[in-house]
Amino acid sequence: IGWLGALMPWPVATVVGLGMDGGWLATLAYERRLAAQGDHSPVVSGLGWTFGFLATGVLVAHALVGPSPAGWLAVAWLPLAAKALWLVHGLWERTALT
């Protein structure tokens, strides 16, 4: 956290990080709710991908400048993986495989 203090106070960074993570989780949950109702919103989906890429980019940036990159890289793929799995699930639901 020492290197972060030079860029941004840690309370601000925590709020920003929670906002980004909350954003992609909220859009993912809302997409699931829409899908359960038989609906789809390209705007919500695009917003979710944007939050996912943003969260992944920030986690990779932490890995590149932080003292222990392995931990950051271990979780950096999670936002995009969640979106990708939801995309695959949606494609699966549209086929006769269910």
Image (cartoon, rainbow, N blue to C red):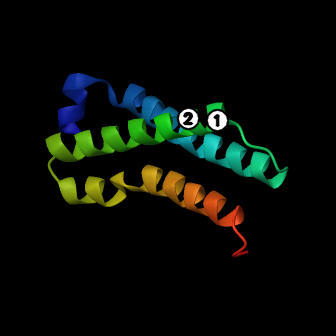
Asked if disc 1 and disc 2 are in contact, CB closer than 8 Å, the reply is yes
| Above or below: residue 37 compared with residue 22 | below
Q: CA distance from mark 1 to mark 2?
A: 6 Å
Q: Residue at x 56, y 61 (%)?
A: 88
Q: Residue at x 76, y 51 (%)?
A: 35
On the rendered structure, is 31 left or right of 12? right
The 10 Å Cα crowd at callout 2, few under 14, some 14 to 19, many 20 or more, is few
Task: Find residue 42 and report its horizontal and vertical position in percent.
Answer: 64, 35
Among the 4 quarters of the image, the one containing residue 44: top right
| Above or below: residue 87 compared with residue 3 | below
68 and 21: which is toward the camera = 21
On the rendered structure, is 41 left or right of 50? right
| Above or below: residue 47 compared with residue 68 | above
What secondary structure is marked by label 2?
helix
54 and 67: which is toward the camera = 54
Q: Residue at x 21, y 59 (%)?
A: 70
66 and 92: which is toward the camera = 92
Task: Find residue 17 and report its horizontal and vertical position in percent.
Answer: 43, 36
Of the numbered discs in the image, which one, if any, rests on residue 96? none
Task: Find residue 38 and report its horizontal and vertical position in percent.
Answer: 83, 50
Q: Which residue is mark 2?
A: 46
Task: Find residue 9 and report its horizontal and vertical position in percent.
Answer: 32, 25
Q: Residue at x 41, y 29 (%)?
A: 11
Q: Residue furthest bottom?
A: 97
Q: Name the amino acid, label 2.
A: Gly
Q: Name the amino acid, label 1.
A: Pro
Q: Which residue is mark 1?
A: 42
User: Quadrant where the C terminus lies?
Assistant: bottom right
What secondary structure is marked by label 1?
helix
23 and 45: which is toward the camera = 45
